[in-house]
Image: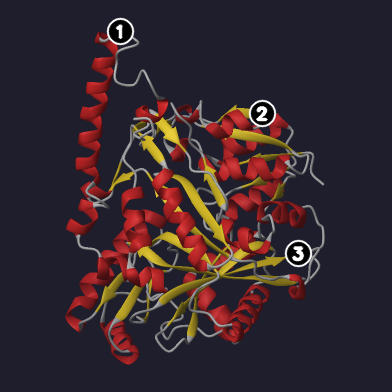
Amino acid sequence: MFKRILIANRGEIAVRVIRGASQMGIETVAVYSAADRLALHTRLADYAYPIGPPPARESYLDMDRILDAAAKSGAEAIHPGYGFLAENAQFAERVAQAGLVFIGPTPQAIRNMGSKTLARAIMKAAGVPVTPGTETGVAPGPEATWVAEEIGYPVLIKAAAGGGGKGMRIVHQPEELIPAMEAAAREAASAFGDPEVYLEKYLEGPRHIEVQVLADHHGNCIHLNERECSIQRRHQKVVEEAPSPAITPDLRRKLGDTAVAAAKACGYTNAGTVEFMFDRHRQFYFMEMNTRLQVEHPVTEMTTGLDLVQEQIRIAAGEKLNLKQKDVGISGHAIECRIYAEDPLNNFFPSTGQIKYLHLPQGPGIRNDSGIYEGGEVSVYYDPLLSKLIAWGQDRKQALERMKRALQEYHLTGVRSNIPFLLLVMDHPAFVKGDFDTHFITDHFRPDDIARGPEDLEKVAAIAAALAHRMNHLAKILPQDDHPFAESSWLAAGRREGRH
């Protein structure tokens, strides 16, 4: 087993990996940009090394700086987290060339699954169902027009090297195809350095359901059930849960077996996620494979009792999986809400600044995966994800009730957050019933609904601020024994005592 590992990331995922490794008795090394000098992950790690200026390309994406920090720190392995260099095959190769272990899949597996067109071809050859579409990139022109007619409208344009919804367009009419392809190619070139796009059939009313897999270097591969990821905004996941309310036990077995077959088809090792799209008839199709730890991995941990970070480390160290498929069960239900520093009142525009006050919810079944603290800075340079709030219950109803209570207890000031919007989602009848697809947010929430929020929070906040100002004023001008709260702390909390 490793004695010391470096985490090539920041924020809540760096904190998560540090905690998992520390519990195994492994020393941890953090890296940080100038903007993250006082970040939580640098405080929790055993060692911390600066790697450059705030822009990610000059720090967290700089392979030379990260490898130099690994060499100086004496780390034996590197965990990439997610984002940044996590799915970069060249980085995985360079880690190995430096005599270190990359805690993730092989460079070849990353490369194979990183190309969406190559991944589709591999899956199709392995008998894994794929959405009807092209196996190679298609340039805007007559061939694309013919292919789209053959597939049937609506069609989906996707970036071959894409992810996160970038380079993606839905086309409903033939005259929209070429302009949309050109725009998608430009966006793909800007985001991924590769303008290649391809076409596939667009499934109307689809659900996005993924399966977590673990595979060791000894030929063992298992799945850890599915996660429901259909609550999305602009193709970005917002709420995830496990298990999916749409999956039956028989379908779960079939889906899990297919995910294992997909992982074996690309020679996969370590933790990965096979993502599927479900149509209205519950037919599922391979979409892509994420060759890293997922943001939403906690809901799988909460329902299986496993620590996926520790499993990743054990596999990378050459150990065999210590459990078989028959040992994997489902315990209760878990829901995760992504807490973003963004303003629902301003079209979810990112919000930055200092966190002046922070109160994290607690109580039965509540877990916080957070990279923030009171007084910490939310930077303009990085993703606005602040933390992940997870609620577990014996069933979906209890998990949902706990999540709503936790969101109501979650308080932070100094930056805006999407918590009021998440409360709207939790209260929506369609979500409560589990009857939704990837269009849930656009179908059910108008901008005015999002701006208003539960109980018109903006008005409530203004009233609370005025009351607080008045109470502070009275406390200063009245003698201690005469001010309104002198007799009872219960009154100060807004409660009544029997004698009053």
Left or right: residue 317 versus residue 359 is right
Q: Where in the figure is residue 358, as x and y percent of width and height?
A: 43, 34
Q: Earlier in the sequence, mark 1 or mark 2?
A: 2
Disc 3: which residue = 216
Rendered residue at 37%/74% (across/down) = 436
Q: Earlier in the sequence, mark 3 or mark 2?
A: 2
Q: Where in the figure is residue 180, as x and y percent of width and height?
A: 24, 71
How much space separates mark 1 and mark 2, taking CA atoms?
52 Å
Residue type marked 3 = Asp
Quadrant of the image occupied by residue 490: top left
Q: How is the image coloured?
A: secondary structure
- Crowd around label 3: few <14 · some 14–19 · many ≥20 (10 Å): many
Left or right: residue 15 versus residue 466 is right
Q: Where in the figure is residue 324, as x and y percent of width and height?
A: 78, 71
Rendered residue at 79%/52% (across/down) = 317
Label disc, if present, on residue 479 of the rendered structure: 1
Residue lying at the far front of the rendered structure: 499
Residue type marked 1 = Pro
Residue lying at the far bottom of the rendered structure: 150
